Image: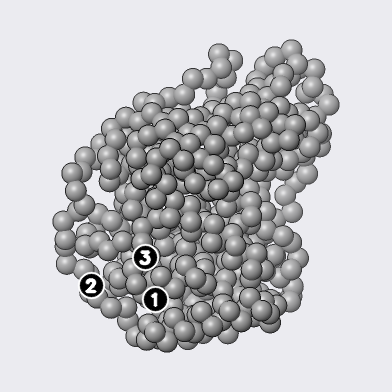
Amino acid sequence: MPSHPATLPRRAFLRTTLAVGAAAALAPHALWAKTSPSSQKVKLACVGIGNRGREIIKALHATGLAEIVALCDTHLGAPHTEEILKLFPNATRFQDFRRMFDKMGDGIEAVSVGTPDFSHFPVTMLAMSLGKHVYVEKPMAHSYRQLELMMAAERKYQVAAQMGNQGHSEANYFQFKAWTEAGVIKNVTRITAFMNNSRRWHGLNVADYLPEQPVPPDLDWDTWLATAAPHRYNVGYQNGDWRSWFDFGNGALGDWGAHIFDTAHEFLQLGLPTEIKTSLEGYSPLIFPQASTLAFKFPARGAMPPVELTWYDGQKNLPPLPENFGASVVDPNIPPPSAGANAPVKLPPGKVIYGEGLTFKGGSHATTLSMLPSEHAHDIASRLPEVPKSPSNHFANFLLACQGREKTRSNFAVAGPLCQAMALGVIAQRVNADLKFDPATRRITNHSVANALLDGPPARAEWEQFYRL
């Protein structure tokens, strides 16, 4: 396996990063990124500049609040990176994020992370340990343990952190907040969430990992793997196809759950489930199933009753819907799934929320809720609370937080438990079993293999340091 290109020797890098982390624990304010005054742009480094990373960078730049100072991608110069390289010709270029921080750390105030799910963790942890603000695409990380460490790092280093579920700064967020605070949405006992679009692994049948192919000479495969277990290179793991594999992605649940039931999770204070009931079609130990039905059972929270949230994915695994559901709620600004966009869509992604006296339907991302027709709904329609407009979109919210002018709406304290709940669902898919989880001890109590998966795979030697930052 190739070594990563010229950077700090591994032992020196380990000493440096751990020393910085130890110093920050004693005096975190001294190591914060020097935040730009509100009149200046935030100096932003971008890790992962193709595919979804490309769209993140363009959206952050479009706010007018960021100066793109560095671009980093393990396959720098590949076709999917060309647009960003042309848009920002003056940004310094790197293939290894470790070398980027080593060479120009003082010139970086914030970082965007648009890499595959499994490599969010090391980039984000190193950035935070060096006092850099971080915008990381959803889901925050790949494993339950990584998420726990990222939440702890946010508290320790006190940087602005934002997970990229952009609807969390739009109309759905403010409506859900206002309606729960006003008691319009109350005593919810059941939620149905669904994402039935075609996915990359639908129709895929594998008996083993993909056969080895020659590594492209311009790809740093070792750094691309990051904290993942060793794998032989195959183009079938690249450019979004990593989503199909348990070792690299978080499936439809991790990809879209944060866009569909994120506001319900936050404002209903769901936290972590105690039980997951699992029903799969087309199970594989390597790739995500062809269809999943996962029933998450969340316990009572104070005066709020227990909630069962049932997730449905798979093209034919359509959820049961109320008879008066009507047409689906679809936001025209929502990008299509990264594969299968031309496949027929029987039911757009969305949700149904069953509360006291009222049932609500909604879509994903920024789409707002509608009350399903009922006598109670008709009575309350004229006395709904005013819903404020968003003062900033998700990308501007992050950059304004870097400047100390706003607080991030999907910080790791908010997004972390949401992603941990989804990570537990991914484990249930991976072992094809019902799970019982103890939120107090943070352990899966009925399945030893599933419990071991909370930690994710053992990190390769040179990547263990990221778990100690």
Q: Position of residue 30 (x, y in %)?
A: 68, 82
Q: Secondary structure at mark 2?
A: loop
Q: Amino acid at mark 3?
A: Ala
Q: Amino acid at mark 2?
A: Met
Judge whether 62 appears above or below 337 on screen: below
Q: Is residue 382 visible?
A: yes
Q: Secondary structure at mark 3?
A: loop
Residue 19: assigned label? none
Q: Which mark is residue 96?
A: 1
* Neighbourhood count class around disc 2 (C-alpha, 10 Å): few under 14, some 14–19, many 20 upward: few
Name the image quarter holding the N terminus. Answer: bottom left
- Residue 6 appears at what percent x and percent y? 34, 85
Up the image or down, 107 lies above or below 389; here it is below
Vertical placement of residue 322 versus 445, above or below: above
- 415 sits to left or right of 30: left
- Residue for point 55% across, 23% down: 327
User: Could you give the CA–CA distance between mark 1 and mark 3, rounded to whole angstroms?
Assistant: 18 Å
The quarter holding residue 342 reads: top left
Asked where in the image residue 428 lies, by quadrant, the reply is: top left
User: Mark 2 or 3 closer to N-term?
Assistant: 2
| Cα–Cα gap, marks 2 and 1 | 16 Å
- Kind of residue sitting beneath label 1: Asp
Which residue has dot 2 on it?
Answer: 1
